[in-house]
Image (cartoon, rainbow, N blue to C red):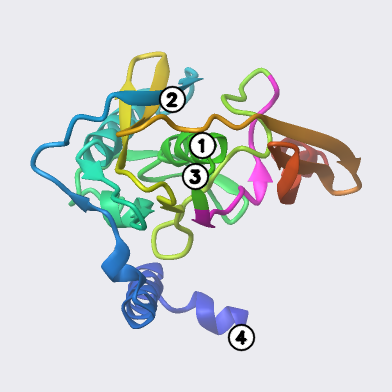
Amino acid sequence: MRWLKDQIPRSWRLQAQVMRRQWRDQSSGIAQQFAQEVAELPLLPYQLEEVHPVRQSSYYEEKLHNLRLGAQRINQIIIQPGQVFSYWHVLGAPSAQNGFREGRNLINGKLQADFGGGLCQLSGILYLLALRTGLEVLERHHHSIDIYTEEERFCPLGADATVEYGYKDLRLQNNYPFAIAFEIEVQTEAVLARLRSAQELTDLPLTFQREPNSNGVYVRTLRDEKECEREVCISFYQQLER
């Protein structure tokens, strides 16, 4: 069965998956809740900020380009009460036709060049802001393989949010009774993300507890001392050694 699936071109499989997801979104009604682009953002005087470093690596310039393009589109979105921020609904397909460049991506457990490389840093910083402010996380996926050493890591282990067009999205719902918006600034060495709001936001304490596991590291995410996520993080470098 796997052999037969591999004979179907990847682009065909992706197109079919995108169509399935769009049908599910329409039939469930969530598509009508997606936050939309606005011509001008209203005044949102309150903010919480998160800063992540951008490390020098292969495809560094391409990653910066992809981050800036993604940030530009995210910065045009306002999320009204009850609305849902869908990462891929906002950014669109990570393709050359959509303005993205090839960068480093983790595909089937291997580091490869693919369009949209580096965009997981944007989704990860948005997820961390969502955790801090108590937004409803409707969909989030952690990386199947942890590709970073401790020196390279730009966010706590367990705070990532991988995205794969058509398959894995980041979806956050505004459960505040006022409008919010993400604002992202991409510098040469850092990504600054702010969650702006019409009224003051709650800033919840986060803890990421690690425990050794036979397959890697077991991570529990605690928000305001209550567990909200648990996962096993498998090291890419441990996999190479096996």
The residue to which callout 2 is attached is 48
Q: Which amino acid type corresponds to the residue marked 4 in the rendered image?
A: Met
| Residue 78 or residue 178, whichever sits in front | 178
Q: Distance between the residues labelled 2 and 3?
A: 34 Å
The residue to which callout 4 is attached is 1
Q: Distance between the residues labelled 4 and 3?
A: 25 Å
The answer to whether the residues at label 2 and label 3 have Cβ atoms under 8 Å apart is no
Question: Which segment did they paint magenta?
Answer: 137-150
Q: Which of marks 2 and 3 is in front?
A: 2
Q: How far apart are marks 2 and 1 (CA)?
A: 8 Å
Sequence-first tag of 2 and 1? 2
Q: Which amino acid type corresponds to the residue marked 1 in the rendered image?
A: Thr
Q: Residue at x 34, y 41 (%)?
A: 102
Circle 4 packing at 10 Å, graded few (<14), some (14-19), many (20+), is few
Residue 215 position within the rendered picture, expressed as x and y whole percent measured from the top left? 85, 49
The residue to which callout 1 is attached is 133
Q: In which quarter of the image is residue 194?
A: top left
Q: Is mark 2 on a helix, strand or loop?
A: strand
Q: Which amino acid type corresponds to the residue marked 2 in the rendered image?
A: Leu
Circle 2 packing at 10 Å, graded few (<14), some (14-19), many (20+), is some
The residue to which callout 3 is attached is 112
Q: Which amino acid type corresponds to the residue marked 3 in the rendered image?
A: Gln
Is residue 235 at all visible to an observer of this figure? no
Residue 241 position within the rendered picture, expressed as x and y whole percent measured from the top left? 81, 39
> Is 179 covered by the magenta stretch?
no
| Quadrant in which the C terminus appears | top right
